[in-house]
Every structure is written in structure tokens, then in C-alpha cells.
Image: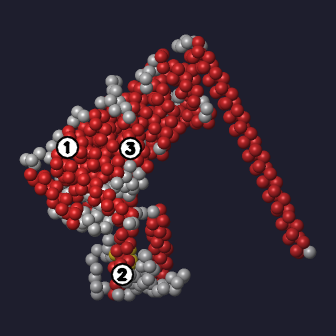
């Protein structure tokens, strides 16, 4: 028995067992739903020996689980969630199809089945049952662990809202699930699908028992982009060749290399054209030059892409290349949007005075900045984010984590936080509560481990007239602590050690820069001397040849 047959057997057993359990649990008055389950079981039995790629796809049976969940009966819901988690884990249900539950209603035509799946699972959080909440988390975890991550946009936001709602209800273990979900979204490299384009091809779910219509997945590599750039550059060179030839022969009877607004068939300039041979293969140009793909003579000009082509297949292939790159770009933007959705939501939840989820949200923000610094550079740090940082610096429970976040932001996004850093440092210097002094000193102690970074901050802020002092005010604050004006003896000792260490590092840094400058000057002198010696050798050789 091969792998497909093994998977098919598991699929048959799991789905049949699940539907039979639901059939027994449903009340007698649910006649239509029971009839639907009976028909589904008959169809599964009929396809028992049908081993193909659709034979283990249970997306079309999700409607049964949705109707059962909508009953809001704890026992039935528990059965649905338990079996859904198994089906999702085995990739028998992945939501990778159009949402046939909403498509015919005209509601959000770009909606996918995964959106309805997540919506139904999350709706179970309204039931007050810890076991159900545990199963909800397992189902969502299984969706995030699938190879093809489809949860996106508003559905992704709803998922994180449900996660934090369950955390508020006392599910402390859910933190690992949230962390895994964040990792899945940020690691996701799946190229999204152009839903509108696929819908225009007429896909529909008019019949519930039709074979599932999967969306064609477009796999695009960097090599495809390089190939497209290369043929475009080659086409530009061809245009230059034609242009130069046009200059040589004159402009009168030469066709233009574009489609005119009004084509005049009898005009002589559309009947005559120049002939040029390609240097590398000797192929003579056609009416519009050479085909952009195969370099054969191009008798046609594509009005959509504005390039010469030799045939319909080449036109279609070129058009597909352009569309695929567009899909990849839109998919990348969608993934970036998903990352920003998560980050902004966590920031908003951490930006409240009294919020039980504040600490865990800050932990996840710290995890994102630590693990995915490149994504941070694409964020827009607005006023709400700055308020969130300042608010949590005041709180003793959250100040340590917030200072760590601030430190990482300085490392990875200081170019994007010029004004924001000045606002935050002004708050730290002037408004930070005295009971947060230890956290502030720990932050400064870690910051001075990077003297070049401090020098850069000093150059970009303190040395610029329009900017506020950052480094100066920072060490003035440390000096005040060292003098014992605002803190206890232990903090005084730490502050003194910070000042001494910073001075030592700064002196060492200046000495290194000075040595590098001297070395650079000496290397220039040596290079000049070598150049003079080379000139003398050339003169001697010339003199020897003349002799």
C-alpha cells in the first residue's frame, strides 16, 4: 500500500467515524442536517476506492461541522472540534478553496473557506466550558502549523483576539500557542493567490457535491524575476539597434515601434520596415523587431504589454510572466500587512492603564523585535506606539521588558525613530518614577556596551541644531544618580561604574579612530611612493628600448 492509499484509508475512517458520531448526537428534529450527513456518508462510501488528489480533501464537508457548531450544544460542539482538529492536522481540511458558504450570498467574493472555518471555531469561545476552550486552541494551532498558511487579514486579527480572550479567562498555557502563531505568520513565505483573477474564471460552488475546485498555486522564484529582467534588458538593446538603424536610413518609410492611435493600413510607412541582423545568431528582424521571448522575427506588436511578439503562445507566456510577478508582489505586501496587523494589535493592547493582557503583549512584542528585526524597519511608529512605551516605562511590572524593547529599537530602527527617540528619552530623563531607577541603569549599562552606537546617537542628535540632546541628557541623569540625588547607595555605585566604563570605552574608541586615520595616511604615502617608483621603472625600460 503506497502513501496515497494509506492517507486515503485514514481519511475514510476518520471522516466516517466523525459523521456517524454526529448523526447519533443530533436531535431527531434536525431532519435536514441528518439527511445531509447520510448523503455525505453515501458519497464517501462510493469513493472508497477512488485514490486521487481530491479523494482526501474534506473541505466540502465542513458545512456539516458549521451547522452542528451553530446549534451551540456543548456535547455536539465538543465532538465537532475534536474531529476538526484531527482533520486539520492530517491536512484533510485546509480551507484552501472559495467560501461556498458565503459565495452565493454575494458576501465578500474574495472570501476563502479558511475564513469561515476560523469564524466557526472562534464562535465556540462563547460557550463556558474549559474543555471546549482547550479544543478551540488545538484547532487554531493545527491551522497555523499547516504547510500552507492561509489565515490572513481580518481573520488573523480575530484569531489573536480569541487567543487573548482565552488567556484572560485563565488559560496560561496559551502563550506558547500565540508565540507559535506569531512565528508562523512572520516565517510565512507563501505566495498569495490573486482571488479576483480566479473568480473571473467562473469558479462557483453551485453544487455542494461538486468536486472541490482548488486554487492554482503559483510558485515564483528569484530566478523567474532575474529571467524577466534579462529579457527586458535584451529587448531594450534590440530597440537601440533598431533606433540606430533608423537613424542611418532616415525616418520616412520606417514603421514606428509602437501601436499608433489610429492605424492607417494604406500608409506606406506601415508597409516598409528596416531589416537588421542580430549579431549573436544572425536572425533578421521582423516588422516590429525581434520577439521579446524567443528573438525570432516579430511581425506582431502586443497592445497589452507594448512589446513585439512572433506568435500568440509567446504573447501569452510573456503576459503570464508579468502576472506571476504581480501576484508575488501582492502576496509579499499581504504578508507584510499581516505582520503589521499583529504588531499593531499587540501594541494597542499594551497601551492601556489597566489591562491583564499588558505584560504578555509586551513579551510578544519583545519576541517579535528580537526574532524579526527586519520587519520592524517596515513599521510606522506613530504616537500611540510612543505612548505605549512611555506608559509601560512607568509601571514597575512592565518597565524591565519595555526598556529591553527600547534597547532593541535603538539597535534596529534608530533611523526611523529620530524624533520618537527624543520624546522617549525626554520622558525617561524627566518623568521616570524614582522606583524605576534600577531598570534605567540596567538599560544604560547594556547601551554602553556599544560605544560606536552611542557616538552615532550623539552625532545624529546632540550635534544637530534642530535636534534635542539625547546622549548628554542620558549621562546627566546617570551623573545625578551617581551623586545620590535620586536614589540609594547601590544605585550610586552602579551609576559610577557606568560613567567610568563609558569613559574608558570612549577613550579607547577615539584612540582606535586615530590609529586608523594614521594607518590610512601612511598607506596613502606608501601608495604614492610605489607609483613614483613605477614611473621611474617605465622610463628606464623606454630608455633601454631606445638604446
Comparing 267 with 322, the one in front is 322
Tag 1 near tag 3, CB within 8 Å: no
Find the distance from the CA under tag 1 to the CA under tag 3. 27 Å
Asked if residue 203 shows in the view, the reply is no
In terms of sequence position, does the residue under pointer 1 or pointer 3 come before the other?
1
Q: Residues within 10 Å of mark 3 (few under 14, many from 20)?
A: many
Residue under numbered circle 2: 311
The answer to which image quadrant residue 205 occupies is: bottom left
Q: Residue furthest right?
A: 547
The answer to which image quadrant residue 322 occupies is: bottom left
Residue under numbered circle 1: 76
Label 2: state its secondary structure: loop
54 to the left or right of 416 = left
Q: Residues within 10 Å of mark 1 (few under 14, many from 20)?
A: many
Q: Quadrant of the N terminus?
A: bottom left
Label 3: state its secondary structure: helix
Q: Is residue 78 above or below residue 213?
A: above
Tag 2 near tag 3, CB within 8 Å: no
Label 1: state its secondary structure: helix
Residue under numbered circle 3: 181
Comparing 251 with 218, the one in front is 218
Q: Is residue 336 above or below residue 329?
A: above
Q: Position of residue 124 (x, y in %)?
A: 23, 40
In terms of sequence position, does the residue under pointer 2 or pointer 3 come before the other?
3
Task: Identify the residue at horizontal 22%, vertical 63% (top origin).
Answer: 45
Task: Identify the residue at horizontal 69%, vertical 30% (top origin).
Answer: 507
Comparing 327 with 205, the one in front is 205
Amino acid at each position: 500500500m503506497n502513501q496515497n492509499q494509506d492517507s486515503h484509508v485514514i481519511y475514510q475512517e476518520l471522516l466516517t467515524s466523525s459523521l456517524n458520531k454526529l448523526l447519533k448526537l443530533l436531535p431527531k428534529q434536525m431532519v435536514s442536517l441528518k439527511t445531509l450527513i447520510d448523503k455525505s456518508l453515501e458519497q464517501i462510501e462510493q469513493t472508497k476506492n477512488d485514490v486521487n488528489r481530491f479523494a482526501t480533501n474534506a473541505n466540502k464537508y465542513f458545512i456539516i461541522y458549521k451547522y452542528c457548531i451553530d446549534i451551540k450544544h456543548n456535547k455536539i460542539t465538543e465532538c465537532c472540534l475534536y474531529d476538526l482538529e484531527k482533520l486539520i492536522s492530517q491536512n484533510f481540511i485546509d480551507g484552501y478553496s472559495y467560501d461556498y458558504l458565503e459565495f452565493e450570498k454575494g458576501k465578500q467574493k474574495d472570501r476563502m473557506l479558511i475564513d469561515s472555518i476560523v469564524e466557526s471555531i472562534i464562535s465556540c469561545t462563547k460557550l463556558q466550558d474549559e474543555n471546549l476552550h482547550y479544543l478551540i486552541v488545538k484547532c487554531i494551532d493545527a491551522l497555523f502549523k499547516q504547510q500552507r498558511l492561509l489565515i490572513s487579514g481580518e481573520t488573523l486579527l480575530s484569531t489573536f483576539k480569541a487567543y487573548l480572550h482565552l488567556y484572560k479567562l485563565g488559560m496560561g498555557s496559551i502563550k506558547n500557542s500565540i508565540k507559535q502563531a506569531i512565528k508562523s505568520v512572520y516565517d510565512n513565505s507563501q505566495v498569495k493567490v490573486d482571488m479576483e483573477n480566479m473568480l473571473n474564471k467562473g469558479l462557483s460552488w453551485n453544487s455542494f457535491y461538486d468536486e472541490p475546485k482548488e486554487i492554482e498555486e503559483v510558485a515564483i522564484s528569484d530566478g523567474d524575476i532575474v529571467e524577466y529582467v534579462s529579457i527586458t534588458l535584451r529587448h531594450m538593446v534590440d530597440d537601440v539597434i533598431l533606433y540606430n538603424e533608423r537613424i542611418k536610413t532616415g525616418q520616412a518609410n520606417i514603421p514606428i515601434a509602437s501601436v499608433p492611435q489610429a492605424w492607417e493600413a494604406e500608409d506606406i510607412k506601415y508597409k516598409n520596415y528596416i531589416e537588421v541582423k542580430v549579431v549573436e545568431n544572425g536572425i533578421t528582424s521582423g516588422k516590429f523587431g525581434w520577439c521579446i521571448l524567443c528573438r525570432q522575427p516579430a511581425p506582431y506588436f502586443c497592445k497589452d504589454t507594448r512589446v513585439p511578439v512572433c506568435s500568440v503562445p509567446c504573447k501569452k507566456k510573456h503576459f503570464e510572466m508579468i502576472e506571476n510577478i504581480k501576484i508575488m508582489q501582492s502576496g509579499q505586501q499581504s504578508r507584510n500587512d499581516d505582520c503589521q496587523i499583529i504588531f499593531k494589535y499587540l501594541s494597542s493592547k499594551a497601551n492601556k492603564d489597566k489591562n491583564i493582557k499588558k505584560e504578555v503583549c509586551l513579551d510578544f512584542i519583545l519576541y517579535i523585535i528580537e526574532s524579526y528585526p527586519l520587519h520592524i524597519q517596515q513599521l510606522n511608529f506613530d504616537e500611540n506606539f510612543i505612548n505605549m512605551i512611555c506608559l509601560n516605562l512607568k509601571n514597575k511590572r512592565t518597565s524591565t521588558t519595555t526598556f529591553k524593547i527600547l534597547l532593541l529599537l535603538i539597535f534596529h530602527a534608530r533611523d526611523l525613530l529620530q524624533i520618537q527617540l527624543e520624546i522617549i528619552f525626554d520622558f525617561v530623563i524627566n518623568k521616570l518614577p524614582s522606583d524605576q531607577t534600577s531598570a534605567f541603569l540596567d538599560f544604560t549599562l547594556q547601551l554602553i556596551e556599544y560605544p560606536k552606537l552611542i557616538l552615532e546617537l550623539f552625532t545624529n542628535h546632540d550635534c544637530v541644531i534642530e535636534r534635542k540632546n539625547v546622549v548628554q541628557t542620558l549621562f546627566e541623569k546617570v551623573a545625578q544618580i551617581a551623586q545620590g540625588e535620586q536614589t540609594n547607595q547601590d544605585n550610586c555605585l552602579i551609576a559610577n561604574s557606568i560613567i567610568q566604563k563609558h569613559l574608558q570605552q570612549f577613550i579607547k574608541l577615539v584612540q582606535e579612530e586615530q590609529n586608523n586615520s594614521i594607518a590610512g595616511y601612511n598607506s596613502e604615502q606608501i601608495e604614492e611612493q610605489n607609483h613614483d617608483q613605477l614611473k621611474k621603472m617605465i622610463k628606464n625600460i623606454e630608455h633601454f628600448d631606445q638604446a
